[in-house]
Image: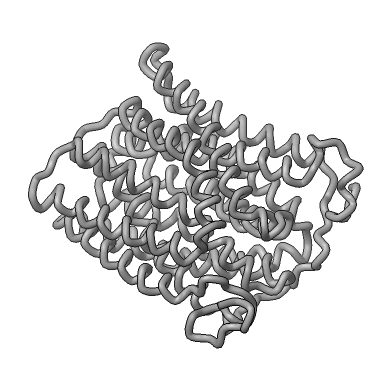
Amino acid sequence: MQIVALNDTGHLPRWRQPVVLLFLMAIAMPVSFNVWNALLNNFVIEVASFDGADIGWLHSVREVPGFLAVGVIALLLLIREQVLGLVSLALLGAATAVTAWFPSFGGILTITMLSSIGFHYYETVAQSLQLQWIDKKRAPQTLGWLISVGSLTTFVAYVLLVLTWKAFDLSYNFVYLAAGGFTFLVAVYCILAYPQFEAPNPQKRKMVLKRRYWLYYALQFMAGARRQIFIVFAGFMMVEKFGFEVNQLTGLYLINLAINIVLAPVFGKFVARFGERRALMFEYAGLAVVFFLYGGIYFFGWGVVLAMVLYIADHLFFALALALKTYFQKIADPEDIAPTAAVAFSINHISAVFLPVGLGYLWLTSPGAVYGLASAMALVSLALAALIPRHPVKGHETRLSRAPVAAE
């Protein structure tokens, strides 16, 4: 196994540079995860007759590995971070490929747990590697491009799905095999083709919880709670209430992706110019309005056109979440990035373990109340984001701490 210091990668050909590896990983992951997500609501309703409570249980089970993401710290004692990320990516692909082989409630929950372990451990490591390998000055723009490339890849997969789903009468099994197989093969290629890159700051191999990171932890907790409502119930609503088929729901995803391809790099520039505080406050204010209007669909009987517009806007606002990554990068000790990424991922998923189940039962009696709670969560996030300094640095993590003379 070849180990190359990050500062000594200049002699490598361009295709073997660390940033290219990050882009390949950003291409491979969304194909499995997003194709699985695009088919999920139709698959579980048509094949396993899921209702709101069942889908809540499924997503609670799916989020357990995210809650246990601190396990990454223990695994890093045995395996290099880059290897762990790619093995997790391969597991995500393999589990996605065989999803349709288990069409019962128990089978779907089991295979979802396996794919979720791959997804959440990959995401934990990928976030850590991005913040270690990308220079702070270029981080917002580069993260924006990573989002854009991932969206472009998913866009191509979804176009193929829309064009071929009915034309060739595709099965769930064929699509899951194709998407998962692609991710698995890319992961194996990356394991074999790239050296192990050594960052200049060795990462701590123990849990890191620091008081000065409290605002980052709080924002992560609220982001996890708020995101679950979108992931679990937005697509489910389009199928259950408005009868969307696979190709129709995928077409809606395509609009989201097309917008993300263009705007994700713009969002990166926006964060670099105006700072994390303004970017996150804009995101949370927008989400509060979106969730409030979602509730109006049920309380006031507003129609499918508004639901489609809100779905697109909802997805668009989430792209600004890259500002939370760059905020942490600016305040963190370099050696804290990997363990704190694992801790933050677990914090992000605390609510994800119980929230989908609880809200799944609330959904059965009042779907509009679910979105009312989401709007309130977005407002709490807005208040927290207002505490981020204009120029966050170590020692000035919040506006409540004394600002260095050169910062503000």
Residue found farthest to the bottom: 402
Nearer to the camera, 75 or 267:
267
Residue found farthest to the left: 300
Nearer to the camera, 26 or 237:
26
Is 66 left, or right, of 280 in this rendering? right
Looking at the picture, the colour scheme in use is one colour
Count every numbered label the image shows and give the total. 0
Q: Quadrant of residue 159?
A: top left
Residue 13 point in image, percent of width and height: 86, 36
Nearer to the camera, 107 or 324:
324
Residue 53 point in image, percent of width and height: 27, 53
- In the displayed structure, 240 sits above or below 379; it is above
Is 347 left, or right, of 355 in this rendering? right
Q: Quadrant of residue 203?
A: bottom right
Residue at the spot 82% in from the left edge and 52% down from the top edge: 197
Residue 333 point in image, percent of width and height: 70, 74
- In the displayed structure, 273 sits above or below 155; it is below
- In the displayed structure, 273 sits above or below 49; it is below
Is 233 left, or right, of 94 in this rendering? left
Residue at the spot 61% in from the left edge and 37% down from the top edge: 28
Residue at the spot 80% in from the left edge and 67% down from the top edge: 201
Query: In which quadrant is the C terminus drawn?
Result: bottom right
Residue at the spot 51% in from the left edge and 33% down from the top edge: 154
Residue 98 point in image, percent of width and height: 53, 34
- In the displayed structure, 238 sits above or below 352; it is above
Nearer to the camera, 80 or 12:
12
In this rendering, does residue 39 appear at all? no
In this rendering, does residue 276 appear at all? yes
